[in-house]
Image: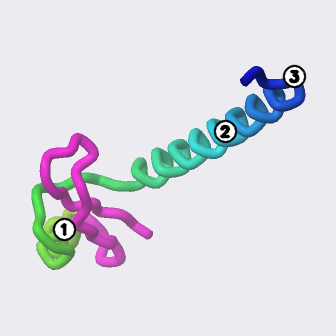
């Protein structure tokens, strides 16, 4: 079944919008990750309290246990917000 020109253009526009949307999500995630200072392995957020606290970080720093960006277990992400 051959596609008409209008159908082909419609599919091209939909694919273009989908790729634009996906690339925007990736860029936003990259910007968010740049706020992290990664410190040591963890199993829960509780493990990150000591690694993300004073004296190396201000008391307002949040420590979150998240998947390692390299895919090797979990790592503490120390972030101001």
Q: Nearer the viewer, mark 3 or mark 2?
A: 3
Direction from residue 13 to residue 34 in the image, left or right = left
Residue 29 x %, y %:
48, 50
Direction from residue 55 to residue 62 in the image, left or right = right
Residue at left offset 35%, top offset 55%: 36
Q: Nearer the viewer, mark 3 or mark 1?
A: 3
Start-end of magenta stretch = 57-81
Residue at left offset 14%, top offset 46%: 72
Cα gap from disc 3 to disc 2, whole angstroms: 22 Å
Circle 2 SS class:
helix
Residue at the extreme right: 6
Crowding at label 1, few (<14), some or many (≥20) Cα neighbours within 10 Å? few
Quadrant of the snapshot with the C terminus: bottom left
Mark linked to residue 5: 3
Location of residue 22 with respect to 51 vertically, above or below = above
Residue 73 x %, y %:
13, 53
Q: Which residue is mark 2?
A: 20
Location of residue 15 with respect to 54 vertically, above or below = above
First in residue order: circle 3 vs circle 2: 3
Residue at left offset 30%, top offset 77%: 59
First in residue order: circle 2 vs circle 1: 2
Q: Nearer the viewer, mark 2 or mark 1?
A: 2
Residue 48 x %, y %:
17, 70
Cα gap from disc 3 to disc 1, whole angstroms: 65 Å
73 falls in the magenta region: yes
Q: Quadrant of residue 6?
A: top right
Residue at left offset 16%, top offset 73%: 44
Residue at the extreme front: 1
Q: Which residue is mark 1?
A: 55
Location of residue 41 with respect to 11 vertically, above or below = below
Crowding at label 2, few (<14), some or many (≥20) Cα neighbours within 10 Å? few
């Amino acid at each position: 079944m051959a596609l008409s020109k209008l159908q082909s253009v419609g599919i091209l526009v939909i694919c273009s919008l989908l790729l634009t949307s996906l690339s925007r999500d990736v860029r936003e995630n990259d910007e968010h990750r740049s706020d992290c200072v990664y410190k040591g392995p963890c199993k829960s957020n509780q493990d990150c309290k000591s690694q993300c606290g004073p004296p190396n970080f201000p008391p307002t720093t949040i420590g979150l246990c998240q998947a390692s960006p390299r895919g090797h277990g979990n790592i503490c992400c120390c972030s101001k917000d």
